[in-house]
Image (spheres, rainbow, N blue to C red):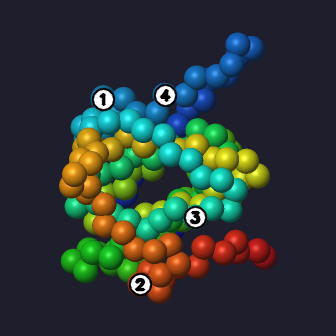
Amino acid sequence: MTLIKGVKTKKLKVVADERGRLMEMLRSDDELFIKFGQAYMTTAYPGVVKGWHYHKIQSDSFIVVKGMMKVVLYDSRKDSGTYGEINEFFMGEHNPILLQIPQYVYHGFKCISEEEAICINLPTETYKYNEPDEYRVAPHSKEIPYDWARKDG
């Protein structure tokens, strides 16, 4: 898969012992660290799609810490070398990664596990309640050439 321009991933290391486990997600000395805005959790129930939206100012850093999600990106930036590209990432307990999503790249996710999936986001900006940096398209809109249905085969 060709990554959309500006998208970065980091394989996360899980350290487990008889007490439990530890997983560092993002450090200020990581190569892909930009800046810290806030941290928040979002969830999805099995089969639920949340999307599409993009940001003009903030970059997102997603880490799925419970369950599994299919996170999908669409590059609608006409001046991008990856214009029109779709990227799919299967993230969560079975594939612990950090996914960094740049400005102007549409993103959404679908819970693909049998239980609620939990995603931590570490955006570069704080949420502005009066002027949200969110530009939305309906999840099943034809504006984005993607079908959220499971692909068996």
Mark found first going from the N terminus, 1 or 2? 1
Examine the rendered structure and indicate whether residue 58 appears above or below residue 65: below
Q: Which residue is mark 2?
A: 143
Mark found first going from the N terminus, 1 or 3? 1
| Amino acid type for the residue under numbered disc 1 | Ser
Q: CA distance from mark 4 to mark 1?
A: 11 Å
| Amino acid type for the residue under numbered disc 4 | Glu
- Is residue 73 visible in the rendered image? The answer is no
| Amino acid type for the residue under numbered disc 3 | Val
Mark found first going from the N terminus, 3 or 2? 3
User: Mark 4 Cα within 10 Å, few/some/many (few <14, many 20+)?
Assistant: few
Whether residue 34 sits left or right of residue 116 in the image: it is left
- Of the residues tagged 4 and 3, which is closer to the observer? 3
Residue found farthest to the front? 130
User: Mark 3 Cα within 10 Å, few/some/many (few <14, many 20+)?
Assistant: many
Q: CA distance from mark 1 to mark 3?
A: 31 Å
Q: Which residue is mark 4?
A: 24
In which quadrant of the rendered view does residue 75 lie?
Answer: bottom left
| Place of residue 83 in the rendered image (x, y in percent of width and height, measured from the top left) | 33, 78
| Place of residue 62 in the rendered image (x, y in percent of width and height, measured from the top left) | 45, 47
Q: CA distance from mark 4 to mark 3?
A: 27 Å
Count of marks placed on residues? 4
Mark found first going from the N terminus, 4 or 3? 4
- Residue sitting at 58 percent across and 79 percent down? 147
Q: Which residue is mark 3?
A: 49
Q: Residue 28: which numbered mark, if any?
A: 1
- Of the residues tagged 1 and 3, which is closer to the observer? 3
The C terminus - image quarter: bottom right
Mark found first going from the N terminus, 4 or 2? 4
